[in-house]
Image (tube, rainbow, N blue to C red):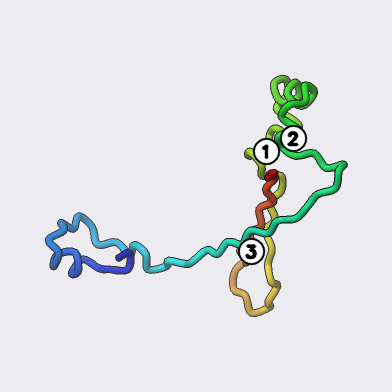
Amino acid sequence: MLRENKTCHRILRIPVKADLPVGQNLQEQYGVLTEFELGDKIELFSQKIRKEANLWNYIMSKTGPLTSVTGVSNIAFLSQGFPESQNDLPDYQLYFLEGAQ
């Protein structure tokens, strides 16, 4: 439905206020979840939030592990590096989420 134009809307008697190119550059975004086990020395976000020093750093200077979006510890933007690429936009965006089951 996003790729329809004003004619399709008028057939369905949907009033058209502006005929804009909505959805003409629609691109899919794929997601893959990969789980792995961390070593004993790595703290989970649920453990970091309970430490008084981390809370104090965040309250006083807005620094430390609690300044990240909840559970997102790192973000990476990657490009395939093909020479024929016409833009400098990344091909992949990786989110490293912290969690436990």
State yes or no: discs 1 and 3 in contact (Cβ < 8 Å). no
Secondary structure category for the residue under label 3: strand
* Residue pictured at 69% horizontal, 51% vertical: 96
Answer few, some or many: residues within 10 Å of disc 1's Cα (few below 14, many 20 plus, some between 14 and 19): few
Q: Secondary structure at mark 1?
A: loop
Q: Residue at x 72, y 37 (%)?
A: 45
Q: Residue at x 68, y 78 (%)?
A: 83
The circle drawn on residue 65 is: 2
The kind of residue on which mark 1 rests is Ser
Give 31 or 91, whichever is nearer the viewer: 31
Q: Is residue 84 above or below residue 97?
A: below
Q: Which residue is mark 1?
A: 68
Q: Are marks 3 and 2 in contact (CB under 8 Å)?
A: no
Q: Secondary structure at mark 2?
A: helix
Q: With 19 as the anchor, is 93 left or right in this view?
A: right
The three-letter amino acid code for the residue at tag 2 is Pro
For label 3, the residue is 92
- Which quadrant, please, contains the N terminus? bottom left
Residue 65 as seen in the image, left or right of residue 15 = right
Q: What separation in Å lies between label 1 and label 3 (alpha carbons)?
A: 20 Å
Q: What residue type is disc 3 on?
A: Tyr
Q: Are marks 1 and 2 in contact (CB under 8 Å)?
A: yes
Query: Mark 1 or mark 3, which has the lower sequence index?
Result: 1
**Front tag of 3 and 2:** 2
Please provide percent x and percent y for residue 21: 33, 64
Q: Which residue sits furthest front?
A: 101
Task: Count residues near mark 2 (Cα–Cα under 10 Å), then give few for <14, some for 14-19, many for 20+.
Answer: some
For the residues marked 1 and 2, what is the alpha-carbon distance in whole angstroms?
6 Å
Earlier sequence position, callout 3 versus callout 2: 2
Q: Residue furthest right?
A: 41
Considering depth in this image, is 74 or 32 the residue closer to the camera?
A: 32
